[in-house]
Image: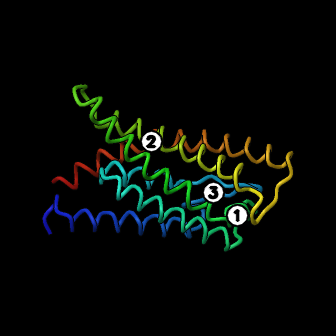
């Protein structure tokens, strides 16, 4: 199978989807639980797929797979905060939007930085930052809009949850900024070889 063909891109997309599914259900791989909340590493895989495949359709698809696995994970009852993600408007919709908009940001960043040395890694770093922030923003917005569906949170509990998710978002941001440019550049180099 020749690199650069549609079939090659589909195979790479399928591999990223498989990684998202696997990491979701491997303990302490896709979600690190502590107390009543958890930090995810899945956004890193999704953003890596976005910067490697460079097409919004693949980014949106990866976001969809991430959202569906998040929904299934929530129903597995593994974490206490999973109950809030039993609503697909909170677990699936934000992740689809993250995939789409992060793809568009990466494409735009590549165009803006194309004359700068190291533009590829810089664009990947921008995608990592924006993708992680979008995830936190879209999830918090979805919780604010739809949080009274399957789970009704009181005002105090909602504020505590939002604060904790924001702190988690900062940890997830640091993780993405460090990993995406380094691993993304290496994967793209090896796929072109």
| Label 3 Cα crowd, 10 Å radius (few <14 / some 14-19 / many 20+) | few
Q: Are marks 3 and 2 in contact (CB under 8 Å)?
A: no
The residue under label 3 is 32
Q: Please give the name of the residue rendered at 49% of the width and 57% of the height, measured from the top-left corner.
A: 96
Image quadrant for the C terminus?
Answer: bottom left
- Sequence-wise, the earlier of marks 2 and 1 is 1
Between 172 and 105, the residue placed more toward the observer is: 105
Residue at 35% from the left image edge and 58% from the top image edge: 58
Q: For the residues carrying marks 3 and 1, which lies nearer the camera in this image?
A: 1
Name which of mark 3 and mark 1 comes first in the sequence.
3
Disc 3 to disc 1, C-alpha distance: 13 Å
Residue neighbourhood size for the residue with mark 1, other residues' Cα within 10 Å, grouped as few (<14), some (14–19), many (≥20): many
Total number of numbered discs in the rendering: 3
| Image position of 124 with respect to 3: above or below | above
Question: Considering only order in the chain, which callout, 2 or 3, is on the residue closer to the N terminus?
Answer: 3
The picture places residue 26, in percent across and down from the top left corner, at 55, 68
The quarter holding residue 6 reads bottom left
| 177 in relation to 67, above or below | above
Kindly report the distance in space between the C-alpha atoms of the residues bearing marks 3 and 2: 19 Å
Q: In the image, which disc is placed on residue 128?
A: 2
Q: Is residue 66 left or right of residue 167?
A: left
Tell me the mark number nearer the camera, choosing from 3 and 2: 2
Q: Quadrant of the N terminus?
A: bottom left
Percent across and percent down for residue 84 are 72, 61
Secondary structure, mark 3, is: strand
* Residue at the extreme front of the image, as rendered: 145
Q: Which mark is residue 82?
A: 1
Relative to residue 108, is residue 95 depicted above or below?
A: below
State the residue at coordinates (56%, 70%). 25
Depth order, front residue of 109/193: 109
């Amino acid at each position: 199978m020749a690199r650069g063909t549609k079939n090659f891109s589909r195979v790479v997309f399928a591999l990223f989807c498989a990684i998202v599914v696997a990491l979701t259900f491997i303990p302490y791989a896709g979600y690190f639980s502590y107390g009543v909340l958890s930090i995810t590493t899945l956004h890193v895989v999704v953003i890596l797929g976005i910067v490697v495949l460079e097409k919004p359709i693949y980014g949106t698809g990866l976001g969809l797979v991430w959202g569906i696995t998040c929904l299934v994970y929530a129903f597995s009852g593994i974490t206490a905060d999973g109950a809030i993600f039993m609503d697909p408007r909170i677990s699936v919709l934000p992740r689809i939007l993250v995939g789409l908009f992060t793809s568009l940001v990466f494409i735009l960043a590549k165009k803006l930085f194309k004359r700068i040395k190291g533009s590829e890694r810089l664009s990947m770093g921008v995608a990592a930052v924006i993708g992680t922030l979008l995830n936190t923003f879209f999830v918090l917005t979805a919780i604010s809009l739809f949080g009274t569906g399957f789970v009704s949170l009181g005002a105090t509990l909602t504020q505590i949850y939002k604060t904790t998710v924001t702190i988690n978002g900062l940890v997830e941001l640091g993780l993405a900024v460090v990993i995406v440019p380094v691993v993304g550049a290496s994967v793209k180099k090896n796929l072109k070889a």
